[in-house]
Amino acid sequence: MRPEDYAADRDRGGKGDHPGLPGGVPLLPMTDCPVRSGRIEINPVDDGYVVYDPDHDLVHYLNHTAAFVLELCTGQNAAAEIADTLKAAYEPGDSGGSIGELVGNCIEQLREQGLVRRTAAPAPPVA
């Protein structure tokens, strides 16, 4: 599945500039380092992931792209770095900028669903 397929799910109104997700949720800053919520149970399946959230007794189905993004939400990768990694995996050599917006929207949806939380950028290592 391509990143555009995930975007079609989240962006029912078509492409274009918008301030955030439907409902006015702002996009996360690309310097934030999202981290997976601690209690979720992640199970790979053929077409992505099935994720169980025991705190809310909810099951989430993630496509391959969203699963890839969730895997990179370790608290050590800034959203911009996640976008760069996804871009390298899906569109090597392409210099288009839409991947960053797609990743930002994906992370925000994962956050809204309680699967990731925001963190500030990690502190630089002490020398």
Image (spheres, rainbow, N blue to C red):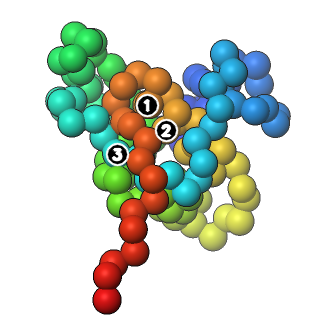
Q: CA distance from mark 2 to mark 3?
A: 10 Å
Residue shown at the point (63%, 37%) measured from the top left = 27
Q: CA distance from mark 2 to mark 1?
A: 5 Å
At mark 3, the secondary structure is strand
Residue named by callout 1? 110
Q: Which mark is residue 2?
A: none
Q: Nearer the viewer, mark 2 or mark 3?
A: 3
Picture layout, residue 49 above or below residue 118:
above
Amino acid marked by disc 1: Leu
Q: Are marks 1 and 3 in contact (CB under 8 Å)?
A: no
Q: CA distance from mark 1 to mark 3?
A: 10 Å
Q: Whole-percent x and y of residue 125?
A: 33, 78
Residue shown at the point (45%, 59%) measured from the top left = 121
Front residue (pair 41, 7): 41
Q: Which mark is residue 35?
A: 3
At mark 1, the secondary structure is helix
Is residue 118 shown left or right of residue 42? Answer: right
- Counting other residues with Cα less than 10 Å from the Cα at mark 2, is it few (<14), some (14-19), or many (20 or more)? many
Q: Are marks 2 and 1 in contact (CB under 8 Å)?
A: yes
Picture layout, residue 75 above or below residue 3:
below
Residue shown at the point (67%, 64%) measured from the top left = 94
Residue 76, by quadrant, is bottom left
